Amino acid sequence: MKRKSTQDLLLLKFCKETNTACQSMLETQSTMSEHAAIDEGFYSRQLYVLGHDAMQMMAAARVLIAGLGGLGVEIAKNVVLSGVGVVTVQDEEHTRWTDLSSQFFLKESHLGQNRATCSVQELSALNPHVRVTAHTGPLDEDLLKKFEVVVLTDSSLDDQMRFGDFCHSHQIKFIVADTRGLCGQLFCDFGERFEVLDQTEEMPASAMIQAVSQGNPGRVDCTDDQPHGFPNGTKVSFSDVHGMTELNSIDPVEITVLSPQSFSICDTSAFSEYKRGGLVTEVKQPCKTISETLLDYSLLQTTDYGKIARIETLHLAFQALHIFVKTKQRLPHIWSQVSEHPRILQPLEQLDEDAVRNLSYTAQGDLAPINAFIGGLAAQEVIKACSRKFIPLQQWLCFDALECLPQGKSEFTGTRYAGQIAVFGPAFQEKLQRQKYLLVGAGAIGCELLKNFALIGLGSGEGHITVTDMDFIERSNLNRQFLFRSQDIGKPKSEVAARAVREMNPQMKITAHLNRMDPDSEEVYGYDFFEDLDGVAAALDNVEARVYLDGRCIQHQKPLLEGGTQGTKGSTLVVVPLLTESYGPATSNSNDAIPLCTLKNFPHHIKHTLQWARDQFEGLFKQTPENVNLFLRDLQFVDQTLGRGDAEALHVLGAVSDSLEGMTSGGQSPANFEDCVRWARCKWESLYNNDICQLLHCFPPNQVTPTGLQFWTGSKRCPHPLTFDPNNVTHMGYVVAAANLYGQIYGIPGTRDVNYIRGILETVSVPPFTPNSSLRIHLTDAEMQDNENEKSRLEELKGKLASPSLRSSAMRMYPIDFEKDDDRNFHMDYIVAASNLRAENYDIPAADHLQSKGIVGRIIPAIATTTAAVAGLMCVELYKLIMGQRDISSYRTASINLAVQYLVMSQPCLPPHFKVRCNGGVLRQCRSGFSFGYGQKCCSCIKGCCDDRGSCDFRCRTGVPDMSSPLCTKNLVLPQLAMNLVSQHVCAYCQIFHTYVFYNLLAKAQHCPVSDCIHTDIISPRGLMLCWVGSFS
């Protein structure tokens, strides 16, 4: 009988704790020889987030999503993209005008038709590995029994409680998601026996114990290196406590937080005296039903700590809204009078009446960005329920963006934007449609932003959207860039995305470009282009491009929306000119560099062994063959190499000499594949046995430092040598990969036949090794640099390489460029084996092929749920920008981690200021440029004249100043801002459009070509526009 795999066992455990339908599904699936393999090409980036085991469990799961409005389709889209086995969408409603505000798979031609039926084909096209079905009948218990996870959207409170109780009693994971206007909420009940099998993204909070008192209550003090991080009321367990051992065996105990480093627990007065050690760990409690949690405020999670007082009010307001709908059979009228407001029946100490009123005002609203955010969070909870990976929400989450509300009243209209007009009114909708925006990037976030732009109507009137992306669609994009389909592979992302959103909203006016946003494209995206924009959205995947785009927005004083994701983590940033901090310059990554001595002798993390393996690959299979080829064609190669320092010269010239000399003569040049296998076996012995033995000879396991401390402590892990075992998969994996790669650089064909290679190994004689007592091991990079190499060895190599016969008989070699994505080329096989063997030397946990590929290739993990949530939050800030809000407290930056529902919205930072002195006056500068206060005079050198906007001539890109500055100002201040760039604008004096090129501010200024105009244009590095009288002296 075939032994069950790890995935089989996980699936079996998962299914036994759910319902019989899942067990039946497993029995059906077990008749196959093995589970269908995960499509790594399709799920590439997501696999780095979830892993194979979680993906296998998801592929066996069945999910029901009830309600296919804007929120329901957002959840369904993300769940289908994630790879759940079967998704059924249930909806009895027919398409209405309001649905077009956020249901992106519905069109005007679908009006009057069932929403689920109209959407199922589009949902099916998102993922060929997921079966999507539609159910147009009502919800009942018989339907729910067929699924492991049930999601309710746009449902009544009675249905939530009835179906929630049923799912809880039948161990069906139950999720409720709801949005009303600018507010949303999420609830999860995964049952009393739900167990998280993989918490690798975020482990439960824990802290090291420093002291425990004997008292009632007992006080626990944690080590002061970092806060314990436990919220008040958390239940915790204890382990490894010495002395007061009673703590190790008590049930989870509730804590009362006393300080960031301490908390109180139960009565410990009768316990033994505490001696030392111990770990305190947060204990996750079983889920309660929705009926039990409605008034349990301890289970409420907020996303904005600036609105903590509002969370309980909104939680009760949603319940009151349900009661209102049940009584009136409708939602409150748009911007209704006070008598229409839902009544809060449960008393609160602090009731936010404005929040209740605003929820009532906008309850009929249906906003795509809010649905995108809540939908992304809800879909991630579905993934947790199916895969048992990551910690689920405990148990309620509330969100609002009521700061977006306009002052005037709104109304309901029969257009595709009706759900949005119900919140913001028709005037704001018209303003939205007049916007001109640039979107840079049409990848995952770019697709989600374009979807939101189409649904809210951005630029669909007199406005326009420009999207640019130089990339082309690959198969791995399809898992999270939902505007693309398999038939689009190989086509430009920007063009396909633009066509998709035009189909979504035929009113969209959008132009697609294939340009990179960098200095080379400034002829396209120059002064005129940026001046015509209302704002910019960045959906980029690298820091350099973000910094450049941020600089252009600063220069032209345009608002910028920026967002990024990494797996389940995401962030957003809104940059408002002269109000908030900008993205800022790129920070140095030097802190991420791994010291050479760590790589060479003292690794303590898998990333160290992977980087070491990568360096081995480059040195053996790329750099050495390249150096050999340089030696063969460049007679000056040896002399030039000697000029690079003794250490490097010895390494390079020694490798070249060995590569040119045959193995029979003591070199390493193979004659056939058998020689390649012999080289690989000896290389294995050298790296994983001999080098380690030498290190331990220099620094034995019991070595102490001159100060008496143990040498092998802290980050220095004491290694041990390995003994080659031909039956060990990793050992043989290294030899097979290394032998084939070594053959490739000499043009010798290889083989994957392990038995054949094992037979060759039986004939290999490995030379014995004796440690060198005179060899010095370097402890720091500085010592490595100070190393003095043997001059005699260099002279010997120089003489050997000068031999004409060696050069004439040598053959050209074939360097290998590392390629991580071709599983047939042995590249990743070598890296994984080499790294894991070194990890075994140092007792470092190994990494599998997928993890290694992600680290070595610096692949950014990605998943559709985070992307959707981030894009939704960006568009919430877009509302505020278009309204022209100037109160910084209205804006929010966000940092989220959907693995643990860590969601923090905070007020953006103010721009940093610094001073530039000018003849005793002070200029105030921020990252958005130079600016004065309103109507403020700098000093006598500036005439103090102000234009009609109240600012003097030193102001930041709101137009060309109409006053000149004297010679003293420009000579003292502007030479510090010298920069080569082009100025294009209307001369403030003669009103004629000119283009000037300035090579340097210190050069002689060019004059306006108009005969009576003597003015000179200058733009500072931050975009300051000035007009000078006269010329430089």
Image (spheres, grey):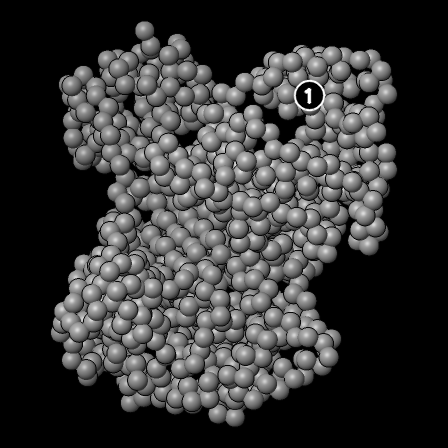
Say few, some or many: other residues with alpha carbon within 10 Å of mark 1 (under 14 / 14 to 19 / 20 or more).
many
Instruction: Give 979 or 707, whichever is nearer the viewer.
Output: 707
Q: Secondary structure at mark 1?
A: helix
Instruction: Give 772 or 633, whichever is nearer the viewer.
Output: 772
Is the residue 237 above or below the residue 579 in the image?
below
Percent x, y of residue 102: 45, 68
Q: Quadrant of the N terminus?
A: bottom right
Instruction: Place residue 932 in its image quadrant.
Output: top left
**Residue at the top extreme?**
1033
Please name the residue shown 35% across and 54% down the image. Answer: 894
Percent x, y of residue 113: 55, 80
Please name the residue shown 62% across and 47% down the image. Answer: 722
Instruction: Place residue 358 in its image quadrant.
Output: bottom left
Q: Quadrant of the C terminus?
A: top left
Percent x, y of residue 541: 51, 46
Question: How many badges with numbers are in the image?
Answer: 1
Report the side of 190 relative to 615 (left or right). left
Please name the residue shown 62% across and 75% down the image. Answer: 8
Is the residue 716 above or below the residue 200 in the image?
above
Instruction: Give 844 or 144, whichever is nearer the viewer.
Output: 844
Which residue is the site of mark 1? 653
Please indicate, yes or no, whether residue 518 appears anywhere in the rendered image: no
Instruction: Give 625 or 475, whichever is nearer the viewer.
Output: 625
Please name the residue shown 47% across and 31% down the image. Answer: 779
The amino acid marked with disc number 1 is: Leu
